[in-house]
Amino acid sequence: GAGVSQSPRYKVAKRGQDVALRCDPISGHVSLFWYQQALGQGPEFLTYFQNEAQLDKSGLPSDRFFAERPEGSVSTLKIQRTQQEDSAVYLCASSLGRGTAYNEQFFGPGTRLTVL
Amino acid sequence: AQRVTQPEKLLSVFKGAPVELKCNYSYSGSPELFWYVQYSRQRLQLLLRHISRESIKGFTADLNKGETSFHLKKPFAQEEDSAMYYCALSGLSFKTIFGAGTRLFVKA
């Protein structure tokens, strides 16, 4: 079956623009995670959804970052007034069960955001 | 604070040689440890987790709580093992903490 998909795969934004990144998780997966991966670093946790509920948003770096998953399926990560330091690969992952314990996360291909 | 440290950014070995990718963690509790792998032009995927106690593609990892380590080992490296490897930790929260990664290069 289809894995996790993300769109767009590449996004170039001018500083100050708003961007929206989309994640389509594997059908039926309860949990959805967003990560930010800067060049040469490992993925850093941004936020976690269990169905439509955002249970942890402690990793969002500022109030310019906003994520939603209104129907418990597709999720959108929105970044307002983008800054150069927002340039990174944004990864989405989903898993069948709740939380992280005993649940394998399936990753999407990522969206590479470049802010000029 | 929760932290995962992978001290080597790059590890280069010859085909057939043993390989060990180091991972140390900091966590005040009982974490679940993972190794994720990313092959060239592929997405990040789970390689193994300590709770499963399994060997995947010849790789094993033992959780050493005394040394707070979860090193990944393989007795005989293959060229197809060349990839980026990330050690990761999950605890009671919903976060997974990743290390910075080690690039393994297996030379013919």
Image (spheres, coloured by chain):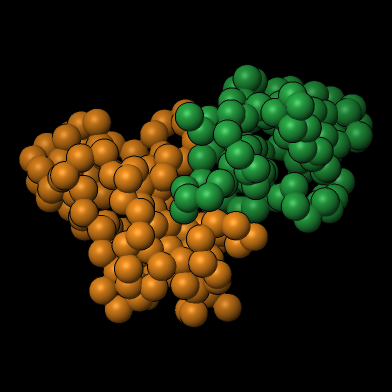
Chain colours: A orange, B green
Does A29 appear above or below A111?
A: below
Residue drawn at point x = 39 percent, y = 34 percent = A38
Front residue of A113 and A26: A26
Q: Can residue A111 be seen in this view?
A: no
Q: Can residue B34 be seen in this view?
A: yes
How many numbered marks, from 0 up? 0
Most extreme residue toward the top, as rendered? B7
Q: Find residue B38 and report its image quarter.
A: top right
Report the side of B45 relative to A24 (left or right): right
Q: Find residue B18 and report its image quarter.
A: top right
Residue drawn at point x = 35 percent, y = 54 percent = A56
Report the side of B78 relative to B50 (left or right): right
Q: Position of residue B31 (x, y in %)?
A: 63, 43
Residue drawn at point x = 58 percent, y = 29 percent = B26
| Quarter containing the C terminus of chain B | top right
Residue drawn at point x = 70 percent, y = 28 percent = B68
Q: Position of residue A100 (x, y in %)?
A: 55, 56
Does B26 appear above or below B35?
A: above
Does B64 appear above or below A92?
A: above
Does B66 appear above or below A53?
A: above
Front residue of B15 and A70: A70
Front residue of B99 and B27: B27
Q: Position of residue B33 (x, y in %)?
A: 66, 44
Report the side of B54 relative to A48 (left or right): right
Q: Where is residue A31 in the image (x, y as percent from the top left)?
A: 46, 66
